[in-house]
Amino acid sequence: MKTLLVSLEYPPFKGGVANYYGNLAHYWPLGEQLSVLDNSRQELLDLSKDFKLLPPWWRSFGSINRKLTSGHFDYLLVGQVLPLGTVAFVLSWFRSLPYAVFLHGLDLSSALHSPRKRWLAALIFWRAKRVICANSYVARLLVKSYSFLDEDKIEVINPGVAAGAPYVQPTTLLSLRQEHGLIDKVVLMTIGRLVRRKGVDNTIIALSLLSPEEKEKIVYVVAGVGPEENYLKKLIKPEDKERVLFLGEISEEEKWQWLHACDIFIMPARHIAGDFEGFGIVYLEANICFKPVIAGQSGGVSDAVSDDYSGLLVDPDNPDSIATAISRLVKNKEERDLLGRQGQNRALVDFNWEKQAKKLLAIIKD
């Protein structure tokens, strides 16, 4: 079977969506053909000129049509419902070629907030053979928003993880803890862009609610940059400043070092005005390093984190709920170890990329 994937976001483009498509392509089953048309050469989207009579994605029509003609493909996978879904919808009337559209979260929210986009997306979904959702929350929102859709055409394929975490020397982890004064501390870790949705603010507030005895055991390490950084630093009470460490931007290698070095990964992401965590691959990355996670019960996070099995789901808008979860895991190393072991097994068995790619292929072949 010859399949064409078209996407505006694809490696070396950064981000979770690009990573999703890059890994599906990398782990595509042997013996099956998958070609990718991305925007690395501005074949789909051209923003080079300040003024145009046509929208910048107009060239996608010619690029995708030429690729389909030269490649003799059996199926088209569309990475963005808008604008690329529009191209697939129009071309489907001239070609007997089935297509599937992917949805991750913000793309659907954006369509729902504009009457014109909502109507256009409805046409694209109606014509599509399948709508592939990256999490079950988006699938439920899609059914609720477009009641005419046959639920049988909606499928969920979560992001996955690689076969295992990169190995880090124990001496490296010891040095990391020594360098930052973390010996004999329970290290809470957040890695992500510093935006309000990630829940770092409520985590800082939750830390202030803990008892002095609990605070003495804890250091909260935050890795990442973003527009909320100054605001977050101002939230820290004077007596807690030594217990919250901002690392700034870290490399991929440093990310894995910190995931191995920490004791608990925490990111109580929440839903803010249509912006929500589509999945949270970093929860699974923490799990494969044997770490339990504390996550916000919002968006697609409940797909990534199994409550009381791989971590704890909390009310992300309630610092008391977050504080209770922190206290519970800080006090109980045995539970931390159990959740970490179970989380690693779940991530490697249920969310490996080979399994996700095979699932997608089976869906479009059906």
Image (tube, rainbow, N blue to C red):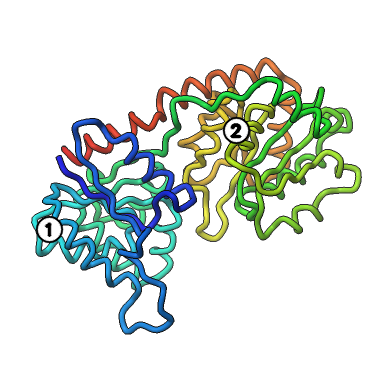
Which residue is at a point 51% across and 32% down the rendered structure image? 284
Looking at the image, residue 288 sits to the left or right of residue 240; the answer is left
x, y percent for residue 7 = 33, 55
Asked whether the residues under the numbered discs 1 and 2 touch, taking CB atoms below 8 Å apart as contact, a structural biologist would say: no
Look at the image and tell me in which quarter the N terminus lies.
top left
Q: Nearer the viewer, residue 267 or 327?
A: 267
**359 or 214, which lies in front?**
359
Q: Which residue is mark 1?
A: 69
Q: Secondary structure at mark 1?
A: helix
Q: Image quarter for residue 158?
A: top left
| Sequence order check, earlier mark of 1 and 2 | 1
Q: Quadrant of the C terminus?
A: top left
Which SS class for mark 2? helix
| Residue furthest right as drawn | 239
Placement of 253 over or under 153, stated as above or below: above
For the point 38% across and 32% down, the residue is 353
Up-down relation of residue 48 to residue 8 (above or below) = below
Residue drawn where x is 70% and y is 25% of the image: 173
Report, in whole angstroms, how far the alpha carbon at label 1 lies from the one at label 2.
Answer: 43 Å
> For the residue marked with disc 1, what is the amino acid?
Thr
Of residue 298 and residue 81, the one placed in the foreground of this image is 81
Left/right placement of residue 365 relative to residue 340 reads left
Q: Which residue is mark 2?
A: 256
Q: Which mark is residue 86?
A: none
Question: Residue visible at 17% across and 62% down?
Answer: 66
Q: Position of residue 345 (x, y in %)?
A: 48, 20
User: What's the residue type where badge 2 is placed?
Assistant: Trp
Determine which quarter of the picture holds residue 82: bottom left
Task: Tally the numbered discs.
Answer: 2
From the top left corner, tell me how far across and down residue 98 is, in percent.
15, 51
Name, please, the residue furthest toward the top.
Answer: 334
